[in-house]
Image: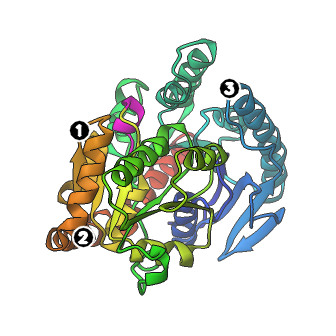
Amino acid sequence: MKKKRILIIVENLPVPFDTRVWKEACALTENGCEVFVICPKGKGYEEKYECIKGVHVYRHPMPKEGNGAIGYLVEYSSALFWEFILSWKIFFKHRFNIIQGCNPPDNIFIIALFFKLFRVKYIFDHHDVNPELYYAKFGRKDLLYRIQVWLEKMTFKLSDVVMSTNNTYRDIAITRGAVPDSHVFTVRNGPDIDTFKPVKAIPELKYGKKYLVGYVGTMSVQEGLDILLEAALYIKKKGRNDVHFTCIGGGPGLEELKAMKRRMALDDMFNFTGRIPDQELLEILSTADVCVNPDRPNKMNDMSTMIKIMEYMAIGKPIVQFDLREGRFSAQKASLYAVNNSIEDFAEKILWLLDYPKERQEMGEFGRKRVEEKLAWKYSIPNLLAAYDRAFDLRIAGGG
């Protein structure tokens, strides 16, 4: 790729903590592009500006993370304001020619719209199906839901190219979004197996128990951590005192989940770490005997690819999850699939894996091999570059 200047805007997480955006930015930089990123500040990522591995990262302040409709509205309005200011600042200094907007939410096209006057093309990096995400969080199709539907429609309409995280999302872009299939590229969010790989297990991380069950992800409603707590309680009531659960990650539901754990008297077999450094995360997952994905069965989770599934596989761990379409596509024989919404079956499948070490090993080996041969991030880079080539071709054809 010739020297090209790209602005990536992400509202959800700081960079490089947002691993998908960071991998994209690094891949583009390594292939000759000059990359600028606008993102929020976050714990450990407080600098207004940093140049990391050649990627220029601009961070803006954010209000406290929202955990309700009004909270999200305030959060996203604040982000949009800072994105507008910083994007013009970067444009006047560097004259980028492509904007990549990463959802949620689906409002970054508003920023890109102004730059279309300067022949800047817009690539939509489709991380989440926001109408389904809103319904999963709040369970209602109200005015704000209809706004999500409209924002998604406008995002697809004003995108020059779409990058979808899986083929289900690709189909949505083509059918629901009416984007030409030649302008939609599947760019999966696989782990970087050069850095995300097993490390030496640390027995002390099992808290004196024989087995450790691990989880990594965001602590919020649709992630189903309440289901995992109920499964742990089921295991405790069966008299199994040899299992410990460790959940890694932060999010708006973390404090509520900690309170739920205390009410359920699970302090002796369950802990939440919050956000921790990557090395500690790898140590916990490498020590775990089984990893879990308790994502609540719903339309959004059925459509979505969860990076934690492939991260578990990269570490060589067997998985228990509910039977969701994209989760099954990713894991295949690396996972057991519980009956949807059955806490009892979810817990029993965890116990079955703990009691059958040979099967655990075989499933873990299958998962590791599948990531190494098909799902690792390196297999997504050609499609990422192809999406950008298409956008630049469109720009040249339009006289940019």
Q: Pick the residue in front: 33 or 339.
A: 339
Element under label 1?
Answer: loop
Magenta run includes residue 332: no
Q: Tell whether 183 sits left or right of 63.
A: left
Which label lies toward us, 1 or 3?
1
Q: What's the distance in space between the residues labelled 2 and 3, CA to CA?
A: 40 Å
Q: What's the distance in space between the residues labelled 1 and 3, CA to CA?
A: 31 Å
Q: Which residue is mark 3?
A: 69
Q: Specify the amino acid type for callout 1.
A: Val
Q: Tell whether 267 sits left or right of 79.
A: left
Locate residue 176, reporting x and y percent. Answer: 40, 23
Disc sitting over residue 339 in the figure: 1
Q: Which residue is mark 2?
A: 364
Locate residue 178, reporting x and y percent. Answer: 40, 25
Q: Which residue is at a point 36% across and 56% down the rendered structure image? A: 292
Q: Pick the residue in front: 383 or 366.
A: 366
Q: Considering only order in the chain, which callout, 3 or 1, is on the residue closer to the N terminus?
A: 3
Q: Is residue 42 visible?
A: yes
Q: Specify the amino acid type for callout 3.
A: Ala
Magenta run includes residue 304: yes
Q: Which residue is at a point 64% across and 65% down the rendered structure image? A: 16
Q: Tell whether 96 sits left or right of 235.
A: right
